[in-house]
Image (cartoon, rainbow, N blue to C red):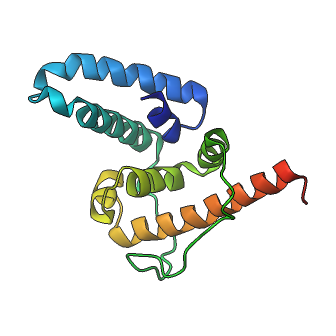
């Protein structure tokens, strides 16, 4: 669960706080779990909801950006050279994203929520969710490429 918390946090300290709060919530609510075989998915949902709640409390309202023309599935693949990356490098790049971008990319690409679900969770529109995801992917690609160039000594 700590890796999960890192994806939704600005720093390791924030992730540790989220982890602690999440387990407190899990222990307080464990009696609501009907099927023990669903424990992992249920815990993930508890942590997602807690991360979203903290995000909404820290935000000053809905996050609005200029909507760019994006389709449900991107027409152009955002790829990085096929060299494998260390998980810590990817996490650092993910943590460097602005909070609203990081939330949308986590919810869509990793937690498999639809744009409708993301929009409802963040209190925004579906088109804004799509736009944020598009911008997050572009920025994440740039950050990963910068990190790879720094690691290989390229300028």
On screen, 48 above or below 108? Answer: above
Q: Which residue corresponds to the image point at 47% horizontal and 56% vertical from the top-left? A: 105
Q: Which residue corresponds to the image point at 25% horizontal and 16% vertical from the top-left? A: 27
User: How many numbered circles does the render carry?
Assistant: 0
The quadrant holding residue 144 is: bottom right
- In the visual, does 60 lie left or right of 112? right
Looking at the picture, tell me which residue is in the foreground, 27 or 40.
Answer: 40
On screen, 5 above or below 81? Answer: above
Where is residue 46? Give x, y as percent.
Answer: 28, 33
- In the visual, does 108 lie left or right of 38? right
Where is residue 141? Give x, y as percent.
Answer: 64, 62
Q: Which residue corresponds to the image point at 22% horizontal and 17% vertical from the top-left? A: 28
Q: Which residue corresponds to the image point at 28% horizontal and 32% vertical from the top-left? A: 40
Where is residue 49? Give x, y as percent.
Answer: 31, 39
On screen, 29 above or below 77? Answer: above
- In the visual, does 69 lie left or right of 142? left
Residue extending farthest to the left is: 34
């Amino acid at each position: 669960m700590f890796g999960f918390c890192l994806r939704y946090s600005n720093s390791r300290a924030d992730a540790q706080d989220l982890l602690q709060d999440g387990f407190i919530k899990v222990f307080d609510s464990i009696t609501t779990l009907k099927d023990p075989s669903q424990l992992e998915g249920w815990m993930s949902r508890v942590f997602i909801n807690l991360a979203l709640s903290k995000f909404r409390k820290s935000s000053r309202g809905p996050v609005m950006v200029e909507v760019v023309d994006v389709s449900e599935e991107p027409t152009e693949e955002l790829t990085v050279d096929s060299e494998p990356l260390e998980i810590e490098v990817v996490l650092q790049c993910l943590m460097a994203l602005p909070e609203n971008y990081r939330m949308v990319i986590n919810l869509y690409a990793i937690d498999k929520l639809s744009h409708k679900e993301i929009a409802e969770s963040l209190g925004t529109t579906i088109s804004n969710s799509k736009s944020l995801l598009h911008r997050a992917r572009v920025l994440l690609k740039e950050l990963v490429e910068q990190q790879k160039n720094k690691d290989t000594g390229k300028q």
